[in-house]
Image (tube, coloured by chain):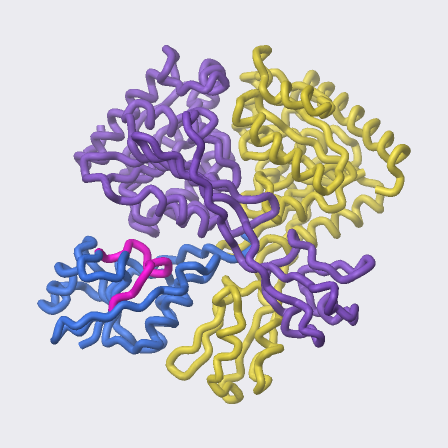
Chain colours: A yellow, B purple, C blue
Amino acid sequence: MKVAVLSGKGGTGKTMVSVNLASVSGCAAYVDCDVEEPNGHLFFRPTNQEEESIMVRSPKVNDDLCSGCRKCVEFCRFNALAYVGGKLLIFDDLCHSCGGCLLVCPEKALTEVEKPMGKVQVGSSAGVEVLTGILNLGEASGIPIIHRLLKKGQNLEDQGREIFVDCPPGTACIVMESIQDADYCLLVAEPSVFGAHNLAMVHELVTLLQKPCGVVLNKEMGEENPSRDYCLEKNLPILGEIPFDNRLGSLNSMGTIAARVQDNYRQWFDSLLETIRKEVGHEKITHPQR
Amino acid sequence: MKKLLILSGKGGTGKTTLASAFIRLSSARRYADCDVDSPNLHLVLSQDMEPVIQDFYGLDKAWINPDLCTNCGLCREHCRFDAIRSDPIHRVDPYGCEGCSVCQIVCPASAITMMPAAAGVLMRYENHHLFSTARLNMGSGNSGKLVTEVKKQLGNDLDDTELAIIDGSPGIGCPVIASISGVDLVLVVAEPTVSGISDMERILETAKIFRTPTAVCVNKYDVNQANTEKIEGHCRSRKIPYLGRIPYDPKAVMATNQGKTIVDLPCPSGQETERVFYKLLKLIFQGKAG
Amino acid sequence: MIVMIPVVNDNASTQVAANFGRASYFMLRDTATGAMEFVKNSAADSPGGAGIKAAQIVVDHSPGALLVPQCGQNAADVIRGAGIPMYQTQGFDLDKNLEALIRGELEVLTEIHSGFHDHGAVK
């Protein structure tokens, strides 16, 4: 089972929820797809880490063959090439590795080399396999890292683990990539107009990709909750509500996994996970083709 | 016109809540929401008019003309982004397409054209004040350029005694960097959590590179006093003006849910925010902290 | 000497633009005769890599110097690759900056920032 945890915005508790769910599962892998600001590892502090560099293809020019025709400069839509002082300059951090410049060069002066743009770290923390994706500063896109993370996640799922994907905030391309193979999307929402607004956005995204989803209402204060209203209006299942809790907030601020230190939190996340498992099982019966 | 930019690094720290309060306190005639991925400012500062809307175009995306396509599959073979489907005819997935135009140059039937693709909308509310904002479409990128457009829309026609307030976006990437250009002061709203401190550091580094004066305040400081003091220490040692600390306040959520700012009703967070605000004014207009 | 400078509008009373890559125009100014010409900056519309494209435009016009408020690393690589000296503007008044340049009061741009990196389709 692969569960993706999303929120429209940062700070709603997405990492807290995904980290705690992975911790109570018994046989899990936690996959941190927020490659610009991965935070899960601050909670897990994984050991036995192995690191793998993620490479992308980057163009390289043979100055002796280059005739200065500038066809590649004109072609590149990302402005990653410039012709200056009789030489072709290549700007890796703008390059999207599309391979087009190689195709347009009449002199075959361009080739491709592999270049590191990020890394994937795999370690463990009390039985949870922790996969962290990190994008190198200044790089264009984290998507190749997401692909690698999800592939490793798939291998671990084949070995019998439940996969919890901590997604980047928002609804941009990279979020779409992160939820590609998810069986279920768990949306974490705050009880404010901001929370409801962002919940609507992320709900729209998962609906577009036809993913079954449910909501966890976090920081619930027992008052008017626009996010709950949204769920009721759209028939979006609310799988659980975490009451606003100073202690939980405090544990979180220190990077502590609540379910690992306090029984009531462990029980709560256990119960949420059971509910999710039931929802996923139910989905597999009613929509086997998905 | 002096420009104040509010950033946080991490999402959910209270940037928009504080920005809206400052706007209310200063009666700013110009303000903007640069969080184009998930704009929220309009939810607190409701506008009593319709905005002027303009489409925002990102990179062109490929389109396959089904009448000319011979289904040879060369485009799919060369597309490095998995953006061309072939079930049953060849067509481009606009969410996957990165606009590189490699498919266009390899197509033997000239069946592919690059078409302008609306990536979002730019919005302008103009009455006695001007509120500039935008919304990026789901699955898009290009935030940096849209942020630049939002700022441009603010204009620069007011004199030096006036203040424009810009609600920035979370993170440390392109949209944040684009928002820093040309502002007079960056206020970093920090959260006293491990993730919050880590992200605050990165924002301060970024602002330093652009030689933009920065100041810091801590929001929800009582979630973790020890971390709050850590932040205060950092500011002291780097000589970054520290403007104060605001307590966690359940009334803040209540206020924003009612479409009010925290200075529209009596509450502890509102009171502290007002204090921070007056120090902010002194810093911007007199260059003095405290 | 012909100098190039990013500006906001294409008329004589324009100001220096705050941003190099996305300035609306470049002004070409003959410091000896005062003659001026405006070039539209087609890089301003680029979703990404605006600095590089703008720098290519500057290089293709071969000015004797470029005046800028600041410059990103990538754009600087292009300008320096062509051997064009860069001077840092002070404030946004066009005439004051040109006068300062002639009096030798403008400093050579030394601090290059890492760039705005507003990339294309994917962030």
Whole-percent x and y of residue A45? 61, 39
Whole-percent x and y of residue C14? 21, 57
Q: Quadrant of residue A168?
A: top right
**Quadrant, the N terminus of chain A:** top right
A5 is higher (above) or lower (below) than C76:
above
Does residue A212 appear to the left or right of C8 in the view shown?
right
Report the predominant secondary structure element of the magenta stretch.
Answer: loop
Q: Residue at x 75, y 38 (%)?
A: A211
Whole-percent x and y of residue A286? 89, 33
C104 is higher (above) or lower (below) than A60:
above
A259 is higher (above) or lower (below) than B107:
above
In this view, the residue farthest toward the left is C103
Q: Residue at x 39, y 78 (%)?
A: A84
Q: Residue at x 62, y 64 (%)?
A: A56
Q: Residue at x 61, y 49 (%)?
A: A173
Q: Name the one closer to the observer, A229 or B189.
A: A229
A73 is higher (above) or lower (below) than A33:
below
Q: Name the one closer to the observer, B208 or A267.
A: B208
Q: Quadrant of residue A204?
A: top right
Query: Residues in magenta?
Result: C15-27
The answer to whether residue C63 is magenta is no
